[in-house]
Image (cartoon, rainbow, N blue to C red):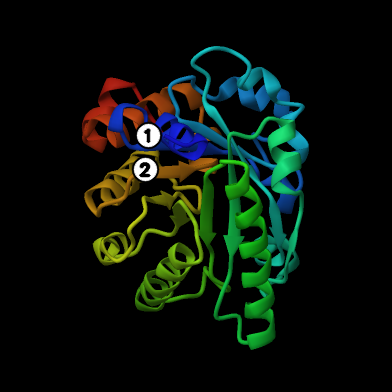
Amino acid sequence: MTGKDIRLNRLFSNGQNAVVVAIDHGEFDGPLPGMINMPEVIKKVDPGVSAVLLSPGMLGHCGAGFDYKGAPMSMVRINWSTVYCFHWNYNDANTVPAISAADAVAAGADIVLVSLTLNTGIEKRDAANVEVFCKLTAEAKKLGIPVVGEFFPTHSDKLSKEEMHEQVYRSSRIVAELGADLIKTFYTYKFNEVTESCPIPILGLGAEKTPKQILALELAEKIIQGGGRGVVFGRNAIQVSDPAAFQRALCDVVKNGVSAAVAVKEYGLKD
């Protein structure tokens, strides 16, 4: 086995699906409710989750979440794109490296995430985004570090379900072809077509905060039923009254096949 294989096997421990808690929002949004004091936020992550996604500058501040036996893996985002800056109404998806894969590993990263946005409307920008993606992916592979390729479209909140599916279906395969080891992307109404078209694991993201916790768990349930190998949930896993209880429920749904309805009752999730 290679170092990459060992790390991927840890993420999908004993063949189970993966649960990733994302707390990297400040890299694009600044402080958000529930994610102000990051050393305190990491304490809200249940040890049973598979990994935590965070920004390179916060890994050192949150080391207590990763420095013990059995801790979640650290997943670090290593490029930066304007497509995530919704509060500035940005959507062009200009993308640059944020940190080298080597520096991320030196800081403690077990896995790196590299995002890619395509179909931006400008061919030169798409090519530049691919160049950043391939450069960082190649660096990580030389180090034996798995690469999560994230496909995130422009104007994601304005796409019809058909448009979202078409973009995710086509671009996820492109991300796989460019060398990602697994993919993070949106759930679509024909998600099984996406998972069946890619030879690598796909993780569904949680997107917007749902008004009720059962809705987030039902989304996770649909992702797994659609062939997904796990989820990446941020606000839905942190901005709740009892984050640890929700995360344990999420792990049961994603890893153990428990239904969302049963998990809500089992963990006493009220809102």
Residue projecting furthest to the front: 1
Above or below residue 40? Residue 220 is: below
Of 173 and 47, the residue lying toward us: 173
For residue 20, the mark is none
Q: Position of residue 71 (x, y in %)?
A: 53, 19
**Residue designated by label 1:** 12
**Mark 1 Cα shell of 10 Å, populated few (<14), some (14-19), many (≥20):** some
Q: Secondary structure at mark 1?
A: loop
Examine the image and state in which quarter residue 145 appears: top right
Q: Position of residue 190 (x, y in %)?
A: 26, 66
Examine the image and state in which quarter residue 230 appears: top left
- Residue flagged by tag 2: what amino acid is it? Gly
Residue shown at the point (53%, 70%) measured from the top left: 153
Residue projecting furthest to the top: 69
Q: Nearer the viewer, mark 1 or mark 2?
A: 1
Q: Position of residue 217 (x, y in %)?
A: 34, 40
- Residue flagged by tag 1: what amino acid is it? Phe
**262 to the left or right of 93:** left
Query: Which quarter of the rendering shows the N terminus?
Result: top left
**264 to the left or right of 90:** left
Of 181 and 58, the residue lying toward us: 181
Residue shown at the point (48%, 42%) measured from the top left: 233
**Residue designated by label 2:** 230
Residue contact between numbered discs 1 and 2, judged by CB atoms under 8 Å: yes
**Mark 2 Cα shell of 10 Å, populated few (<14), some (14-19), many (≥20):** many
Residue shown at the point (38%, 77%) measured from the top left: 166
